Each structure stands twice: as C-alpha cells, then as structure tokens.
Image (cartoon, rainbow, N blue to C red):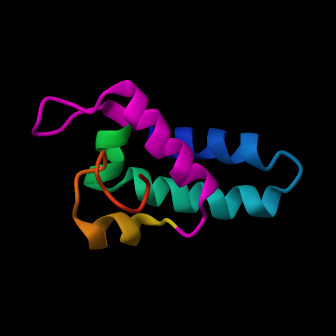
Amino acid sequence: MRNSLAAGLARGFYQDDPGRQDSEKGRLAGIFATDQGRELLFGGGKDGGIPAPARKQALDVICKNRSIAADTLRDTAAPPSTNPAPV
C-alpha cells in the first residue's frame, strides 16, 4: 500500500516529470516504511491515535518539504504528531 500511495502522490505532484516522480516515490515510500510514517498513514499510536487533521497537516508538510526523508523521522524518534520535522 505504501508504494501505491507514494506513487500516486508523486504522480500528482510531478505530472510532467517522470524522473522526479521516481525520486519522490522512493522518498515517500521510505517515509511510509518507518513506524512514524505508518502512524501518519493509519493514525495508530500508543496514545490512542493521531487525529485526522494532525495527520493531514504532517503529511502535507512531508510532501512539500523534500528535505524530510525516512532518516529524518527515524533520527528524531518523536511521535509523528509532535515530530519537529513535519510539524
């Protein structure tokens, strides 16, 4: 699922640039493969879940800020709703 979602987002952002679609798909799939990325996608978590508006905001920031990658989320080790990288 994460690869399909990453591919769809990349196609939507870079409709006329297949090369950029490929790189963005890889970046997003890597993010969605992390524990924090899965929490953002599905809203899970130890504290009962991340509210949909907070998930949407974090995903918007991640999608628009290419400097955020899987390692960014792993290195901070904060829950995705409070992680300083996407929030």
| Quarter of the figure that contains the N terminus | top left
Q: In the visual, does 20 lie left or right of 38?
A: right
Which residue is the extreme one toward the left? 46
The picture places residue 81, in percent across and down from the top left corner, at 30, 45
Please state if 43 lies on the left or on the right of 87 as rendered.
left
In-front residue for pair 85/35 = 85
Expressed as whole percent of the image width and height from the top left, the position of residue 53 reads 42, 28
The residue shown at (79%, 63%) is 19
Taking the magenta stretch, the answer to whether it contains residue 77 is no
Q: Nearer the viewer, residue 57 or 3?
A: 57
Magenta part of the protein: which range? 41-67
Q: How many marks?
A: 0
* Residue 68: % across, % down: 50, 65
Residue in the picture at 22% in, 65% down: 77
Q: Is residue 23 above or below residue 7?
A: below
Considering every residue shown, the one lying at the far top of the view is: 52
Q: Is residue 10 above or below residue 65?
A: above
Relative to 81, say whether 50 is above or below.
Answer: above
Q: Residue at x 52, y 53 (%)?
A: 62
Which sits in the foreground, 74 or 22? 74
Locate residue 85 relative to residue 79 in the image: left or right.
right
Q: Quadrant of residue 42?
A: top left
Which sits in the foreground, 53 or 37?
A: 53
Q: Please name the residue shown 23% across and 59% down the image.
A: 78
